[in-house]
Image: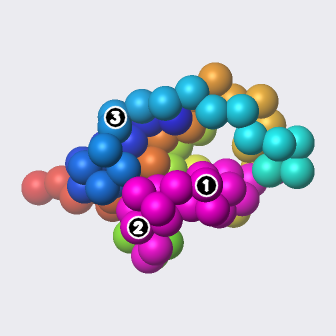
Amino acid sequence: MLYFAWVRERIGKASETVSPPSEVTTVAALIDWLAAGSTDHAAAFVDRNRLRAAVDQVFVALDAPLGSPREVAIFPPVTGG
């Protein structure tokens, strides 16, 4: 897991290795599982509309299947200019 910007600040770490159970099959389910295990994660993930994700460095919707990723990143929406 990789966390960026204010998500990283609220969780208190930039990355971590996790082993979710087999029933965690989507990015949203992974977020739910992480939030259930930590008050810091729960606080960071409270507003799903403010979260974006990437699986193995490809942007995905939160309802995207996980498969067997090497890396999942959670971050706020990115804007450019």
Camera-nearest label, 1 or 2: 1
Name which quarter of the figure residue 43 lies in. bottom left
Residue 74, image x, y percentages: 45, 48
- Residue bearing mark 2: 43
Residue most toward the top?
70
In the image, residue 36 lies in the stretch drawn in magenta:
yes
Under circle 3, the secondary element is loop
Magenta residues (range): 25-47
- Please give the name of the residue rendered at 88% of the width and 42% of the height, measured from the top-left corner: 22
Mark 1–mark 2 Cα distance, whole angstroms, equals 11 Å
Callout 2: helix, strand or loop? Answer: helix
Q: Which of label 2 and label 3 is nearer to you? A: 2
Amino acid under label 2? Ala
Mark 3 and 1 residues: CB-CB less than 8 Å, in contact? no
Look at mark 1 in the image and give the residue it sits on.
Answer: 37
Identify the disc placed on residue 14: 3
Q: Are marks 2 and 3 in contact (CB under 8 Å)?
A: no
Foreground pick, 45 / 38: 38
Tell me which residue sits at (30%, 55%) in the image. Answer: 10
Determine crowd level at label 3: few under 14, some 14-19, many 20+ residues with C-alpha closer than 10 A.
Answer: some
Residue 39's place in the image compared with 17, above or below, is below
Question: Which of the 4 quarters of the picture holds residue 66?
Answer: top right
